[in-house]
Image (cartoon, helix red, strand yellow):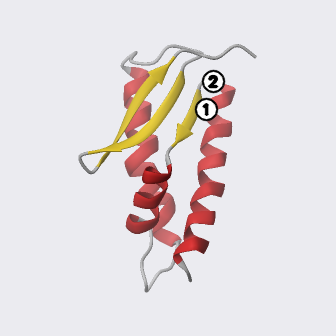
Amino acid sequence: MSKEFIKQIADIQLKELQKRLTKHNYRLTVTNRVKEKLTEEGFDPHFGARPLKRTIQQMIENPLSIEILEGRFTEGSEINADMKNGKVVFTASEPTAI
């Protein structure tokens, strides 16, 4: 299984997460650096892409859920996920007008 194929699987799983967040009026943008890290961490030569879902949960879903519950992001926030010092960090930007 190629790294590019794993990245495509990560994109699909991230789109599902983005859909779930949209239902709660949040918008998530994930940088390519985060996607590359997910691809590296979520691939196992023996198990293929199976660990990817757990990696996304551990690196994005769980920490982001905590930050939302702690009130760091308000409803309607556009949340950006990027890498800093080897970790995924979340920042908010004001929603853009449509």
Marks 2 and 1, how far apart in space?
A: 5 Å
Q: Nearer the viewer, residue 31 or 64?
A: 31
Question: Looking at the image, which residue is at 49% across and 45% down?
Answer: 31
Q: Position of residue 95 (x, y in %)?
A: 60, 16
Q: Which mark is residue 69?
A: none
Q: Which residue is mark 2?
A: 24
Residue 70 occupies quadrant: top left
Of all residues, the one furthest to the right in this rendering is: 98
Instruction: Name the secondary structure under disc 2.
Output: loop
Q: Quadrant of the C terminus?
A: top right
Of all residues, the one furthest to the bottom in this rendering is: 46
Specify few, some or many for label 1: CA neighbours under 10 Å numbering under 14, 14-19, or 20 or more.
few
What amino acid is labelled 1 in the image? Leu
Q: Relative to residue 65, is residue 10 drawn left or right?
A: right
Q: Quadrant of the N terminus?
A: bottom right
Instruction: Name the secondary structure under disc 1.
Output: helix
Question: Looking at the image, which residue is at 55% across and 80% down?
Answer: 2
Question: Looking at the image, which residue is at 44% across and 73% down?
Answer: 43
What amino acid is labelled 2 in the image? His
Does residue 97 sit above or below 80 in this rendering? above
Q: Nearer the viewer, residue 26 or 35?
A: 35
Q: Position of residue 36 (x, y in %)?
A: 45, 60
Q: Position of residue 34 (x, y in %)?
A: 44, 51
Q: Position of residue 4 (x, y in %)?
A: 58, 72
Number of numbered tags placed on the structure image: 2
Does residue 1 sit above or below 29 in this rendering? below
Q: Relative to residue 30, is residue 25 drawn left or right?
A: right
Q: Which residue is mark 1?
A: 21
Contact? badges 2 and 1 (CB < 8 Å): yes
Question: Looking at the image, which residue is at 38% across and 50% down?
Answer: 58
